[in-house]
Image (cartoon, helix red, strand yellow):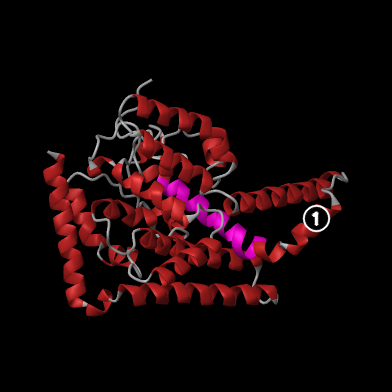
């Protein structure tokens, strides 16, 4: 039954995409538009960073603007992973992937992430959907999940044994091929090495440094990190505030949204209607700003994969109407209590 409904939703959304491109022929120039978006984000980020470095703009404004821009770049990277820009020009395609990754170093290596992401689309909501489980999807809510929502290093290190155990069980039960299991495990591990792990370590050490400074000021203690480490942190100060902290904010917002709009564990195999929901309730707007309103459009992407993020935004109202009328959920906040299960969580 769901196949017929899913096909109808896909057909109607695809027709909406076709119509907007007929109405605005400029939208057909995907490569050019993608490159302009990339260039715009880079130039604005460089400008605001220079102004901050010269102490013309405050630190909070630097963090907010760069987090917003990096959220747009995340959407651009996602489209690149689906080969939507410069598919026939590998040099430009891979250069864009590389520079976007370097500006978002807390994330997975995009070439490894491509393996996990394609697997996610094929097996969304399953035990071996490592991409979503890696950002806490499917876990019960509490302090631990909240604390590790933005974290891809320590958070996944703590969970890796359980994740790999679940993958092994899926192979043994015949739900996953052994060679595919090997590919996604390798991508999950090597995608973090070395840049992602190193970037997290810098943030961890800097956080400890700030906590110690705060403690010393409040309680009069004199506990300090070794002077060599403090010297390195001072050298990395621009990198931390221009790149890492904005990405920490961006990543927390993205992971909180994506891990709760995807369902997990009791999703019918291949049923796209049960894979995701639309989250566009008003109080999520502060989060949505830093992941370019991911909650509004990502469910649309699961139905029609090969279309750009800006086209999804231009047509989202029509797409939402089609999806709502055909059973896709909107703002199902019960998912927070159900550990992202589609149905009620059994004891």
Q: Residues within 10 Å of mark 1 (few under 14, many from 20)?
A: some
Principal secondary structure, stretch drawn in magenta:
helix
Residue 291 found in image quarter? bottom left
Decide if residue 88 is in sight here: yes
In the image, is residue 100 above or below residue 202?
below
User: The N terminus is located in which quarter?
Assistant: top left
- Left or right of 326 in this view: 129: right
In the picture as drawn, the residue positioned furthest to the top comes out as 347
* Magenta-colored span: 240-258
- Left or right of 316 in this view: 221: right
Describe the element under mark 1 as helix, strand or loop.
Answer: helix
**Residue 78 percent coordinates (x, y):** 39, 59
Residue 345 found in image quarter? top left
Decide if residue 135 is in sight here: no
Residue at image mark 1: 230
- Magenta stretch holds residue 176: no
**Residue 30 percent coordinates (x, y):** 31, 73
- Left or right of 225 in this view: 98: left
**Residue 147 percent coordinates (x, y):** 57, 41
**Residue 111 percent coordinates (x, y):** 45, 55
């Amino acid at each position: 039954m769901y196949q017929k409904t899913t096909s109808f939703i896909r057909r109607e959304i695809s027709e909406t995409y076709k119509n907007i491109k007929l109405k605005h022929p400029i939208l057909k120039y995907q490569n050019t538009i993608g490159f302009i978006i990339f260039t715009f984000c880079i130039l604005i980020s460089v400008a605001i960073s220079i102004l901050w470095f010269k102490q013309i703009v405050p630190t909070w404004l630097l963090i907010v603007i760069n987090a917003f821009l990096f959220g747009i770049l995340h959407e651009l990277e996602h489209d690149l992973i689906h080969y939507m820009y410069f598919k026939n020009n590998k040099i430009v395609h891979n250069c864009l992937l590389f520079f976007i990754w370097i500006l978002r170093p807390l994330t997975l290596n995009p070439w490894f992430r491509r393996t996990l992401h394609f697997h996610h689309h094929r097996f969304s909501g399953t035990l071996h959907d490592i991409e979503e489980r890696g950002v806490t999807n499917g876990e019960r809510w509490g302090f631990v999940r909240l604390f590790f929502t933005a974290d891809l290093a320590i958070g996944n290190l703590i969970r890796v044994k359980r994740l790999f155990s679940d993958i092994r069980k899926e192979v043994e039960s015949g739900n996953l091929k052994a060679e595919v299991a090997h590919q996604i495990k390798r991508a999950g591990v090597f995608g973090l090495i070395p840049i992602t792990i190193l970037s997290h370590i810098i943030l961890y050490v800097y956080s400890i440094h700030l906590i110690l400074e705060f403690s010393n000021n409040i309680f009069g203690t004199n506990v300090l990190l070794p002077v060599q480490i403090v010297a390195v942190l001072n050298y990395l100060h621009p990198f931390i505030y221009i790149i890492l902290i904005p990405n920490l904010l961006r990543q927390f917002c993205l992971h909180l949204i994506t891990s709760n709009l995807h369902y997990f564990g009791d999703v019918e195999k291949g049923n796209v209607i049960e894979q995701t929901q639309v989250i566009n309730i008003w109080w999520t707007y502060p989060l949505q700003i830093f992941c370019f309103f991911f909650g509004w459009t990502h469910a649309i992407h699961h139905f029609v994969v090969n279309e750009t993020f800006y086209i999804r935004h231009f047509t989202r109202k029509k797409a939402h109407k089609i999806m709502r009328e055909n059973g896709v959920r909107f703002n199902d906040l019960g998912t927070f209590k159900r550990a992202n299960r589609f149905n009620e969580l059994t004891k």
